[in-house]
Image (spheres, rainbow, N blue to C red):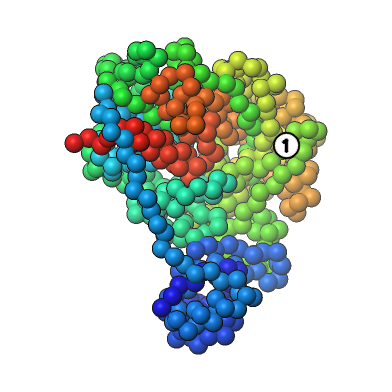
Amino acid sequence: MKTVYLQNLRRELDATDDAFAASCCKKLGIPRDALVRMRIVRQSLDARKKQDICLCIHAELTLTDAAAKKILRDPKWKAEPVKAPEREPFPFGTQTPDGRIVVVGLGPAGLFAALTLAENGYRPLVIERGRPIEERVKDVETYWSGRIPNPDPDSNVAFGEGGAGTFSDGKLTTRIRDPHIDGVLKEMIACGAPEEIAYLAKPHIGTDRLRTVVGNLRRRIEAAGGEVRFSAKLSDLRLRDGAVREVQIREKDRETREPCAALLLAMGHGARDTARMLFEKGVAMAPKAFAIGVRAEHPQSLVNTSQYGPMADHPRLGAAEYRLTGKSGERGVYTFCMCPGGQVVASASGPEQIVVNGMSNFARDGKNANAAVVVQITPEDFGTHPLDGLQYLDKLERAAFLSGGADGTAPASTVGAFLRDEASGPSQSVGPTYRPGVRYTRLSDCLPDFVSAGVRDGIRAFGRQLKGYDMEDAVLTAVESRTSSPLRILRDSAMESVSHKGLYPVGEGAGYAGGIVSAAVDGVKAAEAIMQIYAPLP
C-alpha cells in the first residue's frame, strides 16, 4: 500500500463519508476497494456559486499499490506521494540554569511555552496574576451581570487562566506559516478540542470548549513538573550586568523573590501596569500601529442569506462568517474577530473603562453575528513615546465609560443614526447582546473624529460587499480598543530582549502575535530558544 496526497476533491454537502469515498474512486477511475483509508488534511467551503455550495477537500489516500501507481502516473491529478517526515534531534543546550526558568502569563503564549519547557524536563515556574479558569468564569459573570460596577482588576476578560482568548470565538485561523502549528493543534486536541481543528480551513473551538482545553493544558504542565501560581503578579525585575537575575512576585500582600535564569514574558496586551514597570526598568520598547473602532451586530440570518443565498438554511453550513475591508482616505478600515452567532462582551480590565469584544460558543447558535469595525491608527496619531499608545487607550476607554454609564452600560447606536451623526434611539429589530446593557447615544461623542469618519466609510463600503450590512437597525457598541498591543518590546533574532539578557518577550502583549495560534507558536519558539542554551534539569 502507498499513500498519496490529492487536492481539490469535491464533496457534496449531503454526502456521507462512504458516498464521498465512492465518488472519489469513481472520479479517479479506481475500484472502491482500492481505497483503504482516507485522512482529510484540509477542508474548506466553496461558496462561490450560491446555488451549488460544496466542500473542497485536500486528503491523503492510502491505496493499493496498483491504484497509487495509476494516479501518480496521471499528470491531471497532480498527486504527490506522502513520505514520513524526518525529524532532527533537538539541540539541547549544556549550561546549568542559575535559577528558575519563569513564565509570566497563562494565555496561549505562556501556556505553550510552559508546556514545552515542562515536558522537556525544565520544571518552569509559571505565574499568572489572575485566577484559575473556574474562578475566573465566576468573576467575569459577576461583572457582566451588573452586580459590581467595575471588573476585578486581576480576574477578568483580560487576566486569568487562558488569557483574553478564553472569552472569544476561539478562532484558530492564522496568517503565519510555521511547522509548529500542527503541534499546537495536536496538543489542543489532546486536551479536549474537537479533532476537526486539525483540518478545517477556518477552525474554531468556541469559548465553552476552550475553557476545558485551557484547564487541561495547565494540568499537563503541572503533571510534567511545572509549578503554576495563580494570583501572582510580576512586580519587579532584579538585574545584574544587564541581565535578569531575579524576579519579584506579589501574591496578595506578600512579596517574594525568585532567582531567575530566563524570564519568558507572555503578559498579554491588557497588562498596562506591567508594561509601565518594564519601561521604568529600561526595557527597550517602541510604539506600534494598531486599530480602534466599534463592535457591529447584525441578525445572523442576514449574514447567512448574503453569504449562502438559497442554501442558507442547510444544516451542514452553520452560521456564516465574513471578512470585509475598505478605505477611509489613506487609512484602512476592516472587520476583525468576527463572531458568528455570538455576543458582544464587556472586556474592561480596570475601573471606569468600557471595552467591547466578541465571543461565541462552539455551536455559534446565537441570533446575532458580531464583528469589530476598526480603523488603522499609527504613532503619528498618538505619539512616538513607547507608552503614548497606552495613555491614548486609557483616555479612549474612559471616554466610552463616561458616554455609557456608571453602572457599566456601554454607549451604543443604530447604524442609521451613526451614519447621520445623530443621537440614537433603540434598535427596533436587533437586540444588543452586551451585558450589563447599552445606553443609546450619539456614538461619535466618545470616538476620535477620524475613527467616526473611518467607521462610517467602512460601513458604507461593507454594505456594497455584504447586502444589508448598512441596515438602519444594526447596532454599534463602543469602544473596540484592544485589537492588538500599542507597543512592541524589542527583541533580537534569538527572541531575547535587545536591552536585557535573559528576558524573552512573546505573544500579543509584546507585539509579536495576532491570535491564539500565532501566540502559542511564539511561546513554543521562545521556549525552544531557552532550551538551546540550558540543559534539562536532572
Q: Quadrant of the C terminus?
A: top left
Q: Residue 353: x and y, percent?
A: 54, 24
Residue labelled with disc 1: 332
Vertical side of 201 occupied by 396: above or below = above
Q: Is residue 288 left or right of residue 453?
A: left
Q: Is residue 93 visible?
A: yes
Q: Which of 41/306 is in front?
A: 41
Q: Is residue 136 left or right of residue 58?
A: left
Query: Which amino acid, mark 1?
Result: Gly
Q: Which of 485/477 is in front?
A: 485
Q: Is residue 471 visible?
A: no
Residue found at the far left of this picture: 538
Q: Quadrant of the N terminus?
A: bottom left
Q: Residue 126: x and y, percent?
A: 31, 31
Total numbered labels placed on residues in the image: 1
Q: Is residue 413 left or right of residue 131?
A: right
Q: Which of 396/31 is in front?
A: 31
Residue shown at the point (23%, 43%) measured from the top left: 223
Vertical side of 357 occupied by 170: above or below = below
Residue shown at the point (38%, 29%) measured from the top left: 264
Vertical side of 435 occupied by 339: above or below = below
> In which image quadrant can residue 222 be found?
top left
Q: Is residue 252 left or right of residue 143?
A: left
Mark 1, Cα crowd under 10 Å, few <14 / some 14-19 / many 20+, is some
Residue shown at the point (56%, 33%) measured from the top left: 484
Residue shown at the point (69%, 41%) measured from the top left: 334
Q: Residue 235: x and y, percent?
A: 37, 17
Q: Which of 339/255 is in front?
A: 255
Vertical side of 241 occupied by 484: above or below = below
Disc 1 is placed on an element classified as strand
Q: Residue 104: x and y, percent?
A: 37, 28
